[in-house]
């Protein structure tokens, strides 16, 4: 096993250079050059070649905080941690590398700091923490206070501040204070207490975000019954002196204030080149009159801005429409369309506006978007089980057939999955793992607030059995990157790609695992990122019942590529005491 790991590391450069050649064959020259340099930078970082890292960064400093590719979020700093290269870590941090950026789909476990901590690389953790303290004001007191504020633990916050009053302004890893975290968690009473103690109402986090911004644009995944709490917090913050600019006035729905600020100048009408546009927050909050006023003042109806993915610039259009469709704000959608906003808009990695309206049960919004040219998608028809519309859509757009199985599995639509397995194009082996991942993902039952009336959540379990019976390869390893070669059983142990809000119950997780193991999935297989078995991953994530099941199927309680990656070490490190007991009873050692 250790030889396998050594060989994999030795082959890293050859593998990555093969990726370079493959990419160079298909991509534009400027992008090729950037990708090749990134690969060389990562290889130099891992082997500790400080001079080579300096040389590359001197000409292309942006590579210090750039992903390898759109489907591989490894950055050079990850490779420096893999190689335990302290001096390179320091150099990359000085160049702006983010030590808290993880790798999809298991971002929480794969940030450079998390990986250094798990591996016991104390000097690297200390270097990262020193960098966070310098750049973001991060401290242990800020972390502790922030965590207590985030969960609304007023007693703990009070105890910390009574013992250390200066901690009121202490910051966590994101440069957030307790006030930021309390606002993000919609803890109105705690926000009031912190302000009474003198918290800075306009304090900015590492991204320049103020508490009022978090209160007004808190994210659409927040439960609907908590929106009023955020509105109340916004009013409280403004009443306590929070700065109210055009963006804030738009988010508050204060038409008079919006007009007053626009009369003084329209420079801010589109935010920062489309980012943080007043139109976007007004659309999200459902303030149709404000939307009209902003459009009359010249606001871009699509709030166009640019994002960067692995060094590639991608234009984003239609965030106001997307959010209004998601929230079902019909009057806002009407105003945007009257202002010549696009009806057919897609947000990177988040789908389309029409998709959002359909998935969240806003039929009136969907009808209006369809009338203005929006196009349906296989996923929306699979979720709504509108098979007639799905058939017409596939006939009119034959190319979408390739992604139909993915949509049907994600939507938990058994009828379409069964049909595609029987009559569709055979699924190539390289797609097996991706489709298996969608089956256990729990997409419809997480925090996306999809309308699920009449749908049976057990369809996900039954669909997994269908894929296994169809001969899907349960031993396949992820091939998105050279490092994250996990299997479907590892992915299940990590609660898919959404561990905090994973919707499946412990019983359903064990049902998934039973189908996988009965179908041939290996319980003791190792991967080369966390160097652990599925049992090790389950221990890390505190999945006691899954640990119990895997042990009952013969999982080795001590299997790992390194001592720090043993199941018991994971459970101890992350405080999963019941899992520790279970593993010890099974003969686990640290």
Image (cartoon, helix red, strand yellow):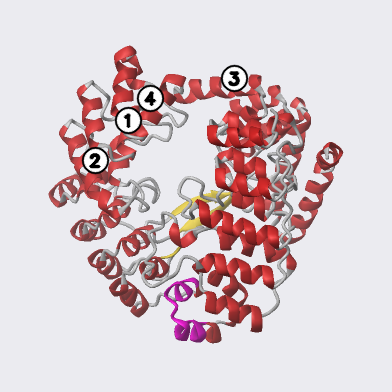
Image coordinates for residue 235, horizontal then vertical, percent: 18, 40
Separation of marks 4 and 2 at Cα, in angstroms = 29 Å
Q: Nearer the viewer, mark 2 or mark 1?
A: 1
Q: Nearer the viewer, mark 3 or mark 1?
A: 1
- What residue is at 51 percent from the left and 51 percent from the top? 506
Asked if 514 appears above or below 236 in the picture, the reply is: below
The foreground one among 78 and 369 is: 78
Q: Are marks 2 and 1 in contact (CB under 8 Å)?
A: no
> Looking at the image, is mark 2 or mark 1 earlier in the sequence?
1
> Looking at the image, is mark 3 or mark 4 earlier in the sequence?
3
Image coordinates for residue 136, horizontal then vertical, percent: 46, 26
* Residue that carries the numbered disc 4 in the rendered image: 145
Separation of marks 2 and 1 at Cα, in angstroms = 31 Å
For the magenta stretch, what is the residue range? 379-393
Name the side, left or right, on which 563 lies relative to 64: right
Q: Which mark is residue 153?
A: 1
């Amino acid at each position: 096993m250790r030889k396998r790991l050594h060989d994999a590391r030795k082959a890293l450069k050859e593998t990555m250079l093969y990726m370079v050649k493959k990419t160079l064959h298909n991509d534009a020259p400027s992008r090729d050059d950037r990708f090749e340099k990134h690969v060389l930078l990562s290889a130099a970082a891992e082997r500790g070649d400080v001079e080579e890292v300096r040389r590359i960064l001197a000409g292309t400093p942006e590579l210090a905080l750039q992903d390898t590719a759109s489907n591989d979020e490894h950055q050079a700093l990850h490779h420096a941690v893999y190689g335990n290269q302290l001096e390179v870590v320091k150099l990359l941090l000085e160049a702006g590398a983010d030590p808290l950026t993880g790798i999809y789909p298991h971002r929480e476990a794969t940030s450079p700091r998390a990986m250094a901590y798990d591996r016991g690389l104390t000097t690297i953790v200390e270097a990262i923490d020193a960098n966070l303290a310098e750049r973001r004001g991060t401290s242990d007191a800020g972390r502790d206070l922030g965590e207590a504020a985030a969960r609304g633990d007023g007693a703990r916050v009070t105890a910390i501040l009574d013992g250390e009053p200066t901690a009121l302004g202490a910051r966590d890893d994101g440069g957030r204070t307790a006030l930021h975290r309390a606002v993000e968690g919609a803890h109105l009473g705690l926000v009031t207490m912190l302000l009474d103690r003198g918290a800075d109402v306009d304090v900015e986090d590492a991204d320049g975000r103020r508490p009022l911004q978090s209160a007004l644009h808190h994210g659409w995944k927040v439960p609907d019954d908590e929106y009023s709490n955020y509105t109340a917090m916004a009013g409280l913050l403004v009443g306590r002196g929070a700065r109210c600019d055009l963006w804030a006035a738009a988010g508050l729905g204060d038409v008079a204030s919006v007009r007053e600020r626009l009369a003084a100048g329209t420079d801010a009408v589109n935010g920062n080149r489309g980012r943080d546009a007043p139109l976007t927050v007004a659309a999200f909050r459902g303030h149709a009159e404000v939307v009209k006023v902003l459009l009359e003042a010249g606001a871009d109806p699509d709030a166009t801005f640019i994002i960067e993915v692995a060094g590639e610039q991608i234009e984003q259009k239609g965030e106001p429409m997307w959010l209004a469709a998601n929230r079902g704000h019909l009057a806002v959608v009407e105003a945007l369309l009257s202002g010549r906003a696009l009806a057919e808009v897609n947000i990177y990695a988040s789908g389309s506006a029409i998709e959002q309206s359909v998935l969240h049960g806003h039929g009136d919004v969907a009808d209006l978007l369809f009338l203005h040219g929006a196009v349906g998608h296989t996923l929306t028809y699979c979720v709504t089980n509108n098979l007639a519309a799905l058939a017409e859509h596939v006939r009119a757009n034959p190319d979408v057939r390739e992604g139909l199985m993915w949509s049907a599995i994600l939507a938990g639509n058994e009828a379409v999955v069964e049909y595609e397995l029987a009559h569709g194009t055979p699924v190539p082996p390289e797609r097996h793992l991706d489709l298996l991942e969608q089956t256990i993902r729990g997409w419809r039952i997480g925090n996306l607030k999809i309308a699920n009336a009449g749908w049976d959540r057990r369809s996900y379990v039954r669909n997994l059995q269908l894929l296994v019976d169809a001969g899907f390869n349960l031993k396949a390893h992820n091939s998105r990157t050279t490092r994250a070669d996990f299997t479907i059983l590892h992915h299940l142990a990590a609660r898919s790609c959404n561990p905090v809000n994973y919707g499946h119950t412990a019983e359903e997780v064990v049902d998934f695992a039973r189908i996988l193991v009965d179908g041939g999935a290996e319980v003791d297989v190792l991967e080369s990122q966390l160097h652990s078995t599925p049992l090790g991953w389950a221990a890390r994530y505190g999945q006691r019942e899954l640990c119990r099941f895997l042990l009952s199927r013969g999982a080795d309680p001590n299997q790992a590529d390194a001592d720090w990656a043993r199941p018991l070490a994971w459970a101890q490190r992350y405080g999963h005491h019941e899992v520790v007991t279970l593993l010890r009873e099974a003969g686990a050692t640290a």
